[in-house]
Image: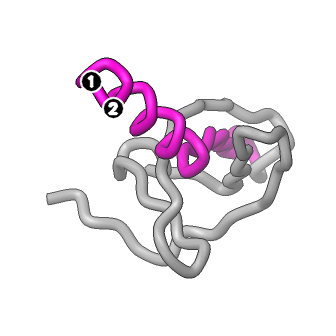
Amino acid sequence: MNIENKIITTIENAKQNVVKITTSKKKGFLKKTTTNKLCGSGFFLKNNYIITNAHVVENTDNLKIELINGKKYTSTIIGKNID
């Protein structure tokens, strides 16, 4: 297998673990429903954990995860390291 085929195979295998992350933050007086929506990406790890950059989930109220097959899930932040 040449290097080009190895790269293509690696990308095809890895893309199944890439997720789209959509975050929203309620803002305004008494946290009305007006939201700022931001997007980022992350990767699946073992046991359905997702890893992403801290700035993607910083100051958010709501996390939505979308898989490459279009399925969507709500998620919870369990920890972050800003260092």
Quadrant that contains the C terminus: bottom left
Q: Quadrant of the N terminus?
A: top left
Residue occupying the point 80% across, 41% down: 69
In this rendering, the answer to whether 3 lies above or below 78 is above
User: Which SS class for mark 1?
Assistant: loop
Answer whether labels 2 and 1 touch (C-beta < 8 Å).
Answer: yes
41 left or right of 27? left
Answer whether residue 44 is magenta in the image. no
Secondary structure beneath label 2: helix
List x then y, in percent, for residue 58.
44, 50
Can you tell which mark lies on residue 6?
Answer: 2
Instruction: Say which amino acid is labelled 1.
Output: Asn
Which residue occupies the foreground of this view, 65 or 17?
17
Q: Which residue, as the protein is rendered here, is positioned at the far left?
A: 83
Q: Residue at x 77, y 60 (%)?
A: 74
Determine whether, in the image, residue 15 is placed left or right of residue 8.
right
Question: Which residue is pictured at 31% across the width and 18% down the height?
Answer: 4
Task: Give percent across and percent down for residue 56.
Answer: 45, 43
Q: Which residue is mark 1?
A: 2
Front in this rendered view, residue 29 or 1: 1
Determine the residue located farthest toward the bottom in the rendered image. 47
Callout 2: few (<14), some (14-19), or many (20+) C-alpha neighbours within 10 Å? few
Q: CA distance from mark 2 to mark 1?
A: 6 Å
Inspect the image, locate mark 2, and give the three-letter code of the amino acid beneath it.
Answer: Lys
State yes or no: residue 14 in magenta.
yes
The tag on residue 51 is none
Tell me which segment is drawn in magenta. 1-29
> Where does residue 2 sit, x and y in percent of width and height?
26, 24
Q: Position of residue 25 (x, y in %)?
A: 65, 44
